[in-house]
Amino acid sequence: MLLQVNIYFYSVGSNFGSLYIYRVQDYNWVLIKVLLDHLTEITSFYISNTLNVFATASIDGYINLYTFPSNYLFRSIKLQANICANSV
């Protein structure tokens, strides 16, 4: 999963629940941070430029909310048992 957060930042997800945040600088990708807050595959990613936050959803049943651009996890929401988060 490759998502453009804005003109300078990109996010790449993996099947293992990790999220990689990159900055593009002089045509080079510079790794800014690796987020390891999900246990399983990230299924959805949403950005609110108005609120300066982004959200991730995962098969593990959690929706995580982060500040942007500091990438700080400020809220983690657990869905009911046996429900995976397919979209945010």
Image (cartoon, rainbow, N blue to C red):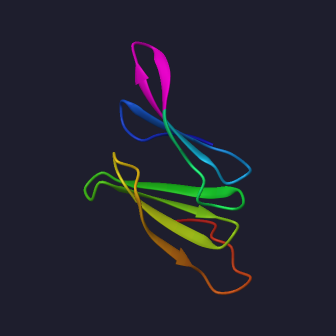
Left or right for 25, reference 36: left
Residue 71 higher or lower than 75, as above or below? above
Point out residue 18 in the picture as x, y percentages from the top left corner.
Answer: 63, 49
Residue 47 higher or lower than 30, as above or below? below
Left or right for 85, reference 32: right
Q: Tell me how many marks there are.
A: 0
Q: Quadrant of residue 26?
A: top left
Residue reaching furthest to the bottom: 80
Q: Quadrant of residue 83?
A: bottom right
Left or right for 69, reference 42: left
Residue at left offset 36%, top offset 31%: 7
Q: Which residues are magenta?
A: 22-31
Residue 71 higher or lower than 55, as above or below? above
Quarter of the image containing the N terminus?
top right
Point out residue 57 in the picture as x, y percentages from the top left corner.
Answer: 58, 63
Residue 25 is inside the magenta segment: yes
Q: Quadrant of residue 78?
A: bottom right
Point out residue 8 in the picture as x, y percentages from the top left corner.
Answer: 37, 30
Q: Main secondary structure of the magenta part?
A: strand
Residue reaching furthest to the left: 50
Residue 33 is inside the magenta segment: no
Point out residue 85 in the picture as x, y percentages from the top left corner.
Answer: 63, 70
Residue at left offset 54%, top offset 69%: 63
Residue at left offset 70%, top offset 86%: 81
